């Protein structure tokens, strides 16, 4: 299992997560992320999912024992011209239907042959590809991609890797030698139509803040920038200290749920940089300093993503630097 820990381990903290996971290997997006893992003393195999962006990165890959994807003939040429202190491990990345990165299947045998003849390339070349629609359970596209992957690699040596989280949970035929889970490691469902609990996953991240103000407003008063929401009656409106400056989605509309003291309340008005406003009707117990949970334990991030017309990935990755991180071990103690 190669844990996808790119983008600060989906916003959870790269080194912290890599150290906590019992992973056989790691998958990252770029050299910078891989070097941070090596500097932290992690010794497992690390795969650069997009390979190198320029030839100057190759000597560092060799020195730090990083594996690289080769998805384009240009990357092959860089390897053929490189003089490295030791060969690097290569994963040949096939385009089986994502049409983003990857070698056209018909060119793969020739490129495989040239890689085998290149002194910069270690002999154990692997095969990988990426699934475009595995999160849609009733969609045959994954099977088509699988078929192409198997046809191209049939009879050729080398380890194979195809499955992301949705492949792992939904398409066991895609597992092969290495799976590459990302989102599911963080306790979030990769499927368009299910919550984490249905997949037996528990959220790793809980994002919370506090209620900083309670205001009594009259019927008809507008709330927030643009006055997009008006009080339908005399009512209490709460202010919580979180906004898009912390990574809360600016597009979350009125009605997006939050948890106030473990009960749901609704966002009202526009999300601002540092604050959101909440409908406190039905929350007579609310007091300043009460905890407000934006997502995580008790409030699936998938629901927030749906309300804000986005997906969980950018919400996780988008938590900004000013948000204080607290690590709670599985027995519930802060460290
Ligand atoms: C990010 C990534 C993964 C992990 O995807 P999830 O959907 O988060 O499980 C796997 N493989 C590749 C090539 C990726 O870029």
Image (cartoon, helix red, strand yellow):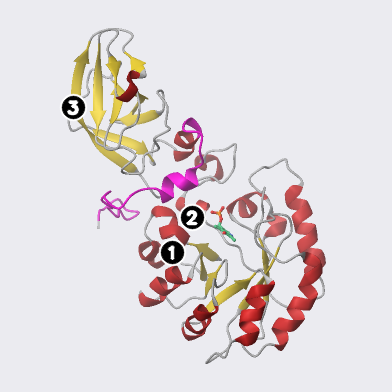
Can you identify the residue that label 2 sits on?
Answer: 185
Q: CA distance from mark 1 to mark 2?
A: 9 Å
Q: Name which of mark 1 and mark 3 comes first in the sequence.
A: 1
Given contact means CB atoms under 8 Å apart, are the residues at marks 1 and 2 in contact? yes
Q: Position of residue 173 (x, y in %)?
A: 72, 57
Contact (Cβ within 8 Å) of mark 3 with mark 2: no
Height in image: 106 above or below 165? below
Lateral position of residue 5 relative to residue 216, left or right: right
- Nearest the camera: 82 or 130? 82
Ligand 1 within 8 angstroms of badge 2 C-beta:
yes
Tell me if I can see residue 202 in this picture: no
Find the distance from the CA under tag 1 to the CA under tag 3: 39 Å
Few, some or many residues within 10 Å of mark 2 (<14, 14–19, 20+) = many
Residue 21 bears which disc, if any?
Answer: 1
Image position, residue 193 (x, y; %): 60, 36
Q: Nearer the viewer, residue 102 or 280?
A: 102
The residue where tag 3 is placed is 213
Label 1 lies in ligand 1 vicinity (Cβ under 8 Å): no
- Quarter of the rendered structure image containing ligand 1: bottom right
Q: Which residues are magenta?
A: 306-334
Nearest-to-viewer mark from 3 and 2? 3
Figure check: 304 above or below 132? above
Q: Is residue 317 magenta?
A: yes
Q: Secondary structure at mark 1?
A: loop
Please say whether residue 309 is one of the residues in the magenta stretch. yes
Quarter that holds the N terminus: bottom right
User: Which image quadrant: the C terminus?
Assistant: bottom left
Q: Position of residue 284 (x, y in %)?
A: 23, 17
The x, y position of residue 234, in whole percent, is 25, 8
The quarter holding residue 112 reads bottom right
* Residue at left offset 22%, top offset 24%: 286
């Amino acid at each position: 299992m190669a844990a996808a820990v790119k983008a600060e381990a989906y916003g959870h903290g790269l080194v912290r997560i890599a150290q906590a996971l019992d992973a056989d290997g790691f998958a990252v997006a770029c050299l910078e992320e891989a070097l941070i893992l090596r500097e932290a003393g992690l010794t497992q195999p690390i795969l650069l999912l997009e390979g190198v962006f320029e030839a100057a990165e190759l000597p560092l890959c060799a020195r730090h024992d990083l594996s690289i994807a080769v998805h384009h003939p240009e990357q092959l040429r860089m390897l053929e011209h490189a003089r490295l202190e030791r060969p690097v491990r290569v994963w040949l990345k096939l385009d089986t239907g994502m049409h983003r990165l990857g070698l056209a299947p018909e060119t793969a045998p020739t490129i495989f042959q040239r890689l085998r003849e290149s002194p910069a390339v270690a002999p154990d070349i692997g095969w990988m590809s990426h699934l475009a629609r595995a999160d849609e359970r009733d969609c045959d596209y994954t099977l088509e991609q699988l078929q192409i992957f198997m046809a191209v690699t049939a009879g050729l040596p080398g380890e194979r890797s195809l499955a992301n989280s949705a492949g792992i949970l939904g398409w066991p035929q895609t597992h092969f030698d290495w799976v590459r889970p990302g989102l599911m490691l963080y306790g979030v469902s990769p499927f368009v139509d299910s919550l984490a609990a249905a997949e037996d996953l528990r959220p790793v991240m809980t994002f919370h803040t506090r209620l900083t103000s309670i205001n009594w407003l009259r019927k008809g008063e507008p709330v927030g920038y643009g006055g997009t929401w008006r009080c339908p009656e005399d009512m209490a409106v709460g202010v919580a200290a979180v906004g898009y400056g912390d990574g809360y989605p600016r597009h979350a509309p009125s009605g997006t749920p939050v948890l106030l003291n473990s009960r749901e309340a609704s966002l009202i008005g526009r999300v601002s940089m540092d604050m959101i406003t909440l409908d406190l009707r039905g929350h007579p117990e609310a007091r300043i300093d009460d905890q407000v949970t934006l997502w995580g334990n008790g409030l699936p991030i998938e629901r927030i993503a749906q309300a804000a017309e986005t997906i969980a990935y950018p919400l996780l990755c988008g938590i900004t630097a000013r948000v204080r991180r607290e690590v709670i071990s599985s027995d519930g103690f802060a460290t």
